[in-house]
Amino acid sequence: MTSSILPQLDISAQQKSIPPLLGASVDELATWVQQQGQPAYRGKQLHDWIYNKGVRSLADISVFPKQWRSELAETPIGRSTEHLRSVASDGTIKYLLKLADGQIIETVGIPSDNRLTVCVSTQVGCPMGCDFCATGKGGFKRNLATHEIVDQVLTVQEDFQRRVSNIVFMGMGEPLLNTDNVLEAIRCLNKDIGIGQRNITVSTVGIRDRIRLLAHENLQVTLAVSLHAPNQGLREEMIPSARSYPIKDLLAECRDYVEITGRRVTFEYVLLAGVNDLPEHAMQLAKNLRGFQSHVNLIPYNPIDDADYQRPRGDRINSFLTILKRQNIAVSVRYSRGLDADAACGQLRTQKSKV
């Protein structure tokens, strides 16, 4: 999928109408610089300064002629500004980033000894309204553009002064409601920043026909489906969109994904005490996934102010895990990082970002 994301106007044209350059490939940038009367090799230089040096203004690109830099000064690259940050005791950092139109989004940098993971947002807010998720309770404003998604990764990479190794599309928003821009961002992150597709995970609550669409894109990304319930009735209580997309149809589409791509599906399952963590729920889940090329991530609930759910006790978590293992379901428990900075799974909408 290609898109015309670069300006084809003279630099002296209305600056506000010029799209940002971030998200463009080296070939697109070469075409653009030639439209400005510059040699094609300037496109490679521009690509290097945007993606490797993290330049925020074209006026700062010292290898460009001084006169041309002056003319380019108002051409937007497409970088956000840091509004606020929260640092957790485990080193995780949540960033509140201000976009060009003043909207605030959240992204999370999660460091470990061998990797740096970025949890990126794809929308301002989220329209899905999942009852246990802070983002869903904040409403929906708009989709993020490609450059606004890519910018989050560059922001974390620059702040940590380390190469980003992994990306999870698990921040604010439903990625498959912003499919075109998410796909463009994945290609940019892969080809322009150098992050392997196998190190990228796209999470979705399930949008009808979009999982099959993703399967036909011939990507090597990991698909993570936010299931969170083993039956239709319970899933409808937790996820409003499940009313129009029954769990049996969702699982059928996931099986098609496995058949088309040859890649397993990860199922995310947030454990809520007394709601979906009972032994019978584990058995129902095992029945649904038996024979499925999949892996289950059990996520003990991370508390938010706007919901009255509780995290299960450790013995309940272990019991659920054991039942699935005995039913030959590949499963693990994922304890979220950044809990004390409201940066854990399901917490992305703090009091500060609401303000």
Image (cartoon, rainbow, N blue to C red):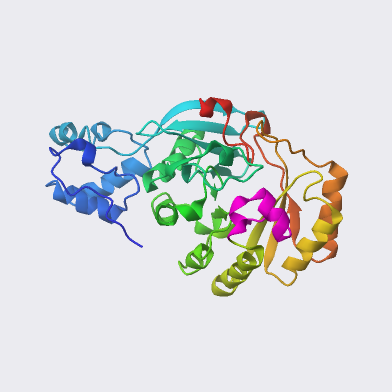
Q: How many marks?
A: 0
Residue 10, position in %: x, y? 13, 43
Residue drawn at x 48%, y 66% is 213
Q: Magenta residues, as a range?
A: 225-244
- Image quarter where the N terminus lies is bottom left
Horizontal side, residue 138 vs residue 286: left or right: left
- The image quadrant of residue 99 is top left
Question: Residue 285, position in %: x, y?
Answer: 76, 61
The quadrant holding residue 300 is top right
Is 155 rendered above or below residue 41? above
Residue 148 in the figure: left or right of residue 28: right
The residue that appears at 86% across and 55% down in the rendered structure is 279
- Camera sees residue 313: yes
Q: Residue at x 12, y 37 (%)?
A: 12
150 magenta-colored: no
> Would residue 26 be found to the left or right of residue 323 on screen?
left
